[in-house]
């Protein structure tokens, strides 16, 4: 029987009623064998996610010596869910033990992980499935990265288990203590489990019906993307199209497992299918552009020097200055005598930017250098762009018609994306202009 690994996000775990809905979805397809869950998320916009409350618990231990007051909110929420679902679990006993451990250790990773742990204990009980603790199958190495050993342990553990629920977001650190992925990391757990269990598909259940061609807050009614490739997804999610954690793609991509994004609240919707590029290219596609995404707050450092391209080591000297300051850069468009570095502004305090500029001056004596702040990067992404003549002409004409000043252009070497830098203030207008050029008749 083929295997589907399903991950349900925080809104799908928000209360007992929604958990029942999740159980119905899982039961409706016997191939949905391994279920990864997030901690209960917000029930209404002013609500607080359980994970956020748990982080506050760890802080309270540090500042007040006890998490009692904050933990009371978590206790109330889970006791409410247990009552709603008439669970046969000693919820009070489990909660007491967690509170005691948070108070004793003050560990924020341990505290944060307990939302997923509790969701998984509950869902295992509701479904009558085995509970497999993530700490026994997901491991981190000493560098804090996923230890590849996790895949074989998952394979061995799951091969004799027909159905199981696994908490997302955490695993066991190299020091033997609970360690979490970065925020939103249950998506990564789902991908790792799908890969380890050699699943046919990784279903990621959330509260939207998949990826839209752009942010619907910018273009209301933006079209749904029914299928896209991993490469396209990587570009779009890195640039802020936030349905999936950007690191969750790697494990499943490596194993050529498709991801299907589905909506718990509209399970009949098709959702978005994310395919390995080889499969994706075998499909029929009419679209040139698959999606558009943007991110604000970058700083661009323009460097100009005549004959720089014949000066051996010029770029290396500049990049080692960034390395020395532990600065990552996003893009590096260059011309014969010019080079630009695009850096996330959050990494650069005023003082650091000045220092970097001074060191670059000293190292390579540019003819001219200046920095431009408050730049938004907009990525227009699509495999179809490479084979369609005139795509960039259409894109730039649309921007010029909308009177948007393009401050920087960068095209990835795979012709999969065209990135433009515009003023932060023009970001939404830019996305909307590109969308209307390629998606409306
Ligand atoms: N609960 C965690 C968070 O809020 C992880 C997740 O939901 O994926 O970040």
Image (spheres, rainbow, N blue to C red):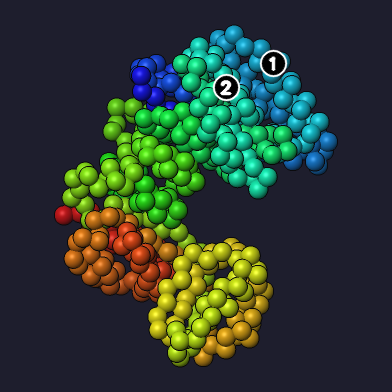
| Residue that appears at 50% across and 27% down | 155
Few, some or many residues within 10 Å of mark 1 (<14, 14–19, 20+): few
Near-viewer residue (319 or 11): 319
Q: Which residue is mark 1?
A: 92
Quarter of the image for residue 23 reads top left
Q: Reply above or below: 317 against 439.
A: below
Left or right, 29 with reference to 342 = left
The answer to whether residue 147 shows anywhere in this view is yes
| Residue that appears at 18% across and 45% down | 284
Left or right, 394 with reference to 216 = left
Mark 1 vs 2, N-terminal side: 1
| Residue that appears at 42% across and 64% down | 377
Near-viewer residue (228 or 413): 413
Q: Are marks 1 and 2 in contact (CB under 8 Å)?
A: no
Label 1, label 2: how far apart the Cα atoms are: 21 Å
| Residue 369 rendering spot, x and y as whole percentages | 52, 84
Near-viewer residue (161 or 93): 161
Q: Nearer the viewer, mark 1 or mark 2?
A: 2
Q: Reply above or below: 353 against 292.
A: below
Q: Which residue is mark 2?
A: 132
Disc 2 residue: CB within 8 Å of ligand 1: no
Dividing the image into 4 quarters, which one contains the N terminus?
A: top left
| Residue that appears at 28% across and 33% down | 270
The answer to whether residue 436 shows anywhere in this view is no
Residue lying farthest to the right in this orientation:
65
Q: Reply above or below: 199 against 29.
A: below
Quarter of the image for residue 433 reads bottom left
Left or right, 279 with reference to 326 = left
Secondary element at image label 1: helix
| Residue 312 rendering spot, x and y as whole percentages | 51, 83
Near-viewer residue (373 or 31): 31
Secondary element at image label 2: loop
């Amino acid at each position: 029987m083929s295997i589907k690994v399903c991950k349900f996000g925080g809104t799908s775990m928000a209360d007992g009623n929604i958990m029942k809905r999740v159980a119905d979805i899982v039961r409706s397809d016997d191939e949905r064998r391994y279920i990864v869950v997030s901690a209960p998320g917000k029930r209404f916009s002013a609500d607080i996610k359980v994970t956020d409350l748990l982080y506050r618990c760890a802080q309270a231990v540090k500042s007040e010596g006890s998490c009692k007051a904050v933990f009371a909110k978590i206790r109330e929420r889970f006791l409410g869910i247990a009552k709603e679902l008439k669970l046969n679990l000693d919820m009070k006993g489990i909660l007491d033990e967690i509170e005691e451990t948070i108070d004793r250790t003050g560990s924020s990773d341990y505290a944060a992980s307990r939302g997923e742990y509790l969701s998984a204990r509950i869902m295992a009980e509701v479904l009558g499935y085995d509970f497999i603790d993530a700490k026994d199958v997901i491991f981190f190495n000493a560098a804090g990265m996923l230890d590849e050993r996790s895949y074989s342990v998952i394979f061995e553990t799951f091969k004799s288990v027909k159905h199981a629920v696994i908490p997302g977001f955490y695993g066991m650190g190299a020091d033997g203590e609970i360690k979490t992925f970065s925020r939103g990391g249950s998506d990564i757990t789902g991908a790792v489990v799908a890969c380890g269990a050699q699943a046919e598909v990784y279903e990621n259940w959330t509260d939207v019906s998949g990826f839209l061609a752009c942010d619907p807050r910018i273009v209301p009614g933006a079209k749904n993307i029914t299928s896209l490739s991993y490469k396209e997804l990587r570009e779009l999610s890195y640039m802020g199209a936030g349905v999936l954690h950007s690191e969750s793609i790697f494990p499943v991509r490596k194993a050529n497992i498709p991801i299907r994004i589905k909506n718990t609240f509209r399970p009949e919707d098709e959702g978005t299918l994310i395919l390995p590029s080889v499969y994706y290219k075998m499909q029929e596609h009419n679209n040139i552009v698959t999606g558009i995404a943007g991110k604000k707050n970058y700083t661009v450092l323009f460097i100009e020097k005549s004959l720089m391209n014949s000066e051996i080591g010029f770029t290396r000297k500049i990049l080692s200055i960034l390395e020395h300051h532990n600065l990552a850069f996003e893009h590096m468009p260059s011309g014969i005598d010019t080079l630009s570095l695009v850096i996330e502004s959050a990494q650069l305090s005023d003082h650091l930017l000045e220092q970097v500029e001074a060191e670059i001056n000293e190292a390579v004596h540019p003819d001219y250098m200046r920095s431009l702040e408050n730049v938004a990067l907009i990525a227009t992404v699509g495999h179809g762009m490479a084979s369609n003549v005139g795509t960039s002409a259409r894109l730039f004409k649309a921007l010029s018609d909308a009177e948007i000043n393009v401050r920087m252009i960068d095209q990835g070497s795979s012709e999969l994306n065209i990135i433009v830098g515009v003023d932060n203030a023009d970001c939404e207008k830019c996305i909307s202009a590109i969308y209307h050029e390629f998606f409306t008749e």
